Image: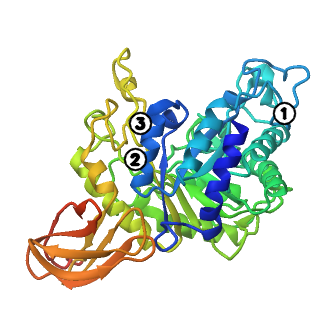
Amino acid sequence: MRRLIVLAAALLAPLVAAGPAHAGRGMQTGIADDAILLAGGQDAADEVVAWQQMGVDVARLQVRWVAIAPGAAATRAPAGFHPRDPDDPRYDWGDLDRAVALLAFAGIRPVLQITGSGPLWSSRAPGRGNPRYKPDPAKFADFTAAVVARYRTAVSRYEVWNEPNQPLWLQPQFACAKRTCTPVAPDLYRDLYRAASREIRALDPGAQVLMGSLGPTGQNPRAANAVMRPLTFVRALGCVDSRYRRIRTGGCARAARITATGFAYHPHPVRLRPDQPSPNPDDAALGSLGRLETVLDRTTRAGVIGPSTGARFPLFLTEFGYQTSPPDPLAGIPPGRQAAWLQWSAYRAWRDPRVREMTQYAWRDEPLRTRISGPGRYAGWQSGLLFADGRAKPALSTFRHPFWVDVQPGLRMATFWGQVRPGGATTVRLLRGGTVIATVRTDAGGAWTAHRLVTARGTYHFEYDTPEGVSRSASQTVAPKPRLARQP
């Protein structure tokens, strides 16, 4: 398997050297679906071929410490275990080896998200019986070193931890006394990130290292393990208060600067439109990316966190999706709306020059928990482009060539945007009804724009020629929008 990874990496190397093969404005298209990739077998091979044909540039894989290291329930690491040695026989790399090799052979770049929880012995207080409680940064550094040493020939981008603002992944989130709760998880994450990024840069100096990977919403802090709101987390990570004044007490008393290639984020909107801001000012779904960027920029000026190069963090949206109803009536939207809103979301992300990656999460729905009644039945993610049984949702047919028409209120000039995946220069025809109204050449990433007057209601789509015949996007019906009334 190690030989397969090296061979796959050799095939992938020209793509890595050349830069993003299908990136439009530097934005890559990604997929994240560990259930498929880590299960392996013919099913995984078939799906990776489908991703390749649909122009997927990168695929994120979670490298879960507890799933690979030995002694999951032990309070001490096994005797004789060498955690920095990837060839220690107690490590179980099998599923990850196969997934990395499969992606690399297909020319899809694996992105490894090195994350907890770890084995119980990785906690700084294993006697509590909670592996999520205060992971030991030194032990996480050892695990990270083993991961990078094993996969550095095939991997060039790493994320450090998953959603550290969620107690499912990191605890405690807060320290609470009486009615006041103070953030703790950002201090824990800062130490974990520093330890891991140091190992990555030492072993693979050219690699990209991403911090953050935050979930988009949180709760009011009334308990130690309430979900922390993402912008609260960013400020605490950067050691500033709500007015962006530098904090020099607690975990920030000796906080040294940490840097990253970019900031990873999961702007799931749930039922919000792609342009709809999150109601709470410290949450940030896709419609509040500007809010996130403002908080990041103001926080980086304090100097504790910052980009490796430049003055502002690039954004990597390493998870994004809309769940559908069916099957989830609690958090889902109709499948047809999912297809439309994913295209709208792709346009909004492409339009933001700071977004470098947008990753669809997931490819296929997780099965419902049929033995459970009530809300717990829908605890998994139903945001796939396929239902759990493999049936296609409408969004599958639009993923390869998203299309959106941006009509602003009071303006008759509209922006038409689309993308052909995989990328590469392609001639597309924009049609109103059955009439071609524009012929446009795509950029290297397959993206194109056109500006046309919209004076009456009309239905538009675009099409392009392929070796198999004419391929066409979904249609979109648009009409002029009246100018918004001024609020009193």
Amino acid type indicated by mark 2: Ala
**Mark 2–mark 3 CB contact (< 8 Å):** no
The Cα–Cα distance between marks 1 and 2, rounded to whole angstroms, is 36 Å
Left or right? Give the position of 44 relative to 149: left
Q: Quadrant of residue 443?
A: bottom left
Judging by the rendered image, the residue that carries numbered circle 1 is 83
Q: Residues within 10 Å of mark 3 (few under 14, many from 20)?
A: many
Residue 276 appears in the figure: no
Q: Nearer the viewer, mark 1 or mark 3?
A: 1
Looking at the picture, tell me which residue is in the foreground, 472 or 115. Answer: 472
Looking at the rendered structure, the secondary structure element under dot 2 is helix
The Cα–Cα distance between marks 2 and 3, rounded to whole angstroms, is 21 Å
| Identity of the residue furthest to the front in this view | 467
- Of the image marks 1 and 2, the number of the one nearer the N terminus: 2
Give the residue at x 31% y 62%: 402
Amino acid type indicated by mark 1: Pro
Judging by the rendered image, the residue that carries numbered circle 2 is 50
- 368 vs 116: above or below: above
